[in-house]
Image (tube, rainbow, N blue to C red):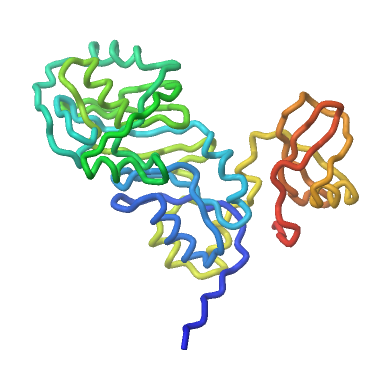
Amino acid sequence: MSRPRRIKNRVDGVVLLDKPLGISSQQAVSRLRHVFSAAKAGHTGTLDPAASGLLPVCLGEATKFSHFLLEADKVYLATLRLGIVTSTGDSEGDILSENSPDTDLDKIQSVLKGFVGSQTQTPPMHSALKHHGVPLYEYARKGVTIERVARPIHIYSVQIVEYQSPLLQLRVHCSKGTYIRVLAEDIGAALGFGASLSALCRTQTGSFLLDHPLVHNIDSFAAMDPPTLQTYLMPVETLLADLPRLDVDETQAQRLLLGQKLRISGPATGLLTRVYGPEAHFLGVVQWEMGGRVVPYRMLAQTVENS
């Protein structure tokens, strides 16, 4: 006789998780989904098992809007071990070369200036990026190298937090798609003696900060009772705070939820806008078309009730 399936709750919102070391982002999301008994969950930007820090997790209907945070800028606290080059670009790989990191802060500052701005970066083989549905790190473990295409990234700032040779701690503000381990290797190469990533912590994703009062680790969430857990569930529209707002009446709201267009004079073509119905009820995101038409882009399921 089969065991009854566990009933999942209708849970919609965003949870700010402090991901621990040693587990993947997907493992962290799965554990948090279990804690909240949510039917669906997804993260907003991968953190490697060797990295810790802020991982906003989308539950339920919030997963429809997770890509908005995937596109957001990130801030990391990265510790580089100067003089050590490894096979993976971090402390988990085999040491390929070891040199004396004979340098001073002035030289480091000069080198770091060259990494600020728009540039291209080739994803590392030891990454979760997929090729034919298989993560690159799986190929790397088998000794297979896959050709990767360099991607455009932007480094907004690289600031020295602390330097005690051979360890150099940096605060890096960067665009989506930036691999900090590759940045560490490139900085080491520019300094002339190599470097690898020793530790990594994400401190900011978009407008969310690691020191936000709602941030907790998995064990803390697991110890909470259901009513307390609800107080840490941020509204779905929290992901969309940077988008302009449009308010519509009840008739217009129903049309949008049915996938129909509205004719409303508005801003530039293509602009995404969060839309609210009567009583400030969040409905989803719409997009403006030519001729003053509003088209549903991502809408909440009609059965969802927002607090």
Farthest residue, direction bottom: 1
Horizontal relation, residue 26 to residue 66: left or right: left
Q: In the image, is residue 211 above or below residue 270?
A: below
Q: Nearer the viewer, residue 58 or 288?
A: 288
Q: Quadrant of residue 294?
A: top right
Q: Nearer the viewer, residue 151 or 83?
A: 151
The residue located at (30%, 28%) in the rendering is: 182
Horizontal relation, residue 142 to residue 78: left or right: left
Q: In the image, is residue 82 above or below residue 227?
A: above
Image location of residue 95, percent across then percent down: 12, 34
Q: Quadrant of residue 46?
A: top left
Q: Quadrant of residue 67?
A: top right
Image location of residue 236, percent across then percent down: 63, 50
The residue located at (30%, 42%) in the rendering is: 137
Horizontal relation, residue 200 to residue 101: left or right: right
Q: Nearer the viewer, residue 57 or 222?
A: 57
**Quadrant of the drawing holding the C terminus:** bottom right
The residue located at (41%, 42%) in the rendering is: 132
Q: Nearer the viewer, residue 231 or 218?
A: 218
Image location of residue 24, percent across then percent down: 35, 51
Horizontal relation, residue 251 to residue 68: left or right: right
Image mark count: 0
Image location of residue 71, percent across then percent down: 53, 34
